[in-house]
Amino acid sequence: MTKPTDGIDKLQRECLAQFFKVFDASTDLMMWQDLIYEEAKEVLTATTVEERLKEAVDLSYVCAGILTAMEVLGDIGEEEFRPVPEHEAITVNAAYAVVLTVKDLVGSDAFDEAFKRVHESNMSKLGEDGKPLLRADGKILKGPNYKPPVLADLVMQAPSTTLN
């Protein structure tokens, strides 16, 4: 029997399993859908190479997140999802095409390293009390110890200069 997370690689499965455990992350699939759309818009509006890589990894992260949530929930029904408006579907599809292009241009190893760094950054979002800070819809917010990921060196190592 296949699981939702069978569609993502080992690194992403491990990172998201840790994220869900530490943050007691929401399994609200509609929230995850909204995060995917939010990150998709950010991928498409990124203006620098480093931003494009960061936003591409963020989109991959929330896509792995919804699959992890689906696995935690087990059998789910269609009522768990909201209908996706066509403009959102187009945005997400376009953004995911950018993700694949960025991954191809920087190389899989650099993309995986960027994923690890974004994960470490996400793990630094805990509040002073060691608990997650949550937005009303369940999204985890940046705590006072948040450290943004540094990805510039990965962009500099990219085998292609066509990222600009």
Image (cartoon, rainbow, N blue to C red):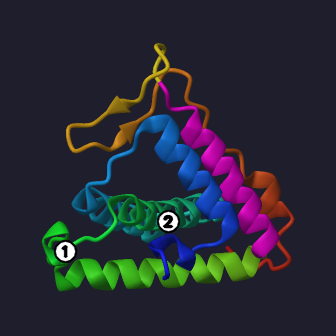
Judged left or right of residue 101, residue 41 is left
Q: Does any portion of residue 48 appear in the rendered image?
A: no
Position of residue 53 measured from the top left corner of the image (x, y, whole percent) = 63, 64
- Decide which of 36, 7 is in the foreground and name it: 7
What amino acid type is highlighted by mark number 1? Gly
**Mark 1 surroundings within 10 Å by alpha-carbon count, few (fewer than 14), some (14 through 19), many (20 or more):** few
- The mark closer to the camera, 1 or 2, is 1
Position of residue 125 measured from the top left corner of the image (x, y, whole percent) = 50, 32
Q: Which residue is mark 1?
A: 77
111 shown above or below 116? below
Q: Does any portion of residue 102 appear in the rendered image?
A: yes
Quadrant housing residue 162: bottom right
> In the rendered structure, does residue 156 fall within the stretch colored magenta?
no
Residue at left offset 39%, top offset 58%: 72
Q: Earlier in the sequence, mark 1 or mark 2?
A: 2
Residue at left offset 37%, top offset 78%: 92
Q: Which residue is mark 2?
A: 64
Position of residue 30 measured from the top left corner of the image (x, y, whole percent) = 22, 62
Mark number displayed over residue 21 = none
Tell me where the magenta segment starts and ends, as one range.
Answer: 108-126
Residue at left offset 49%, top offset 20%: 130
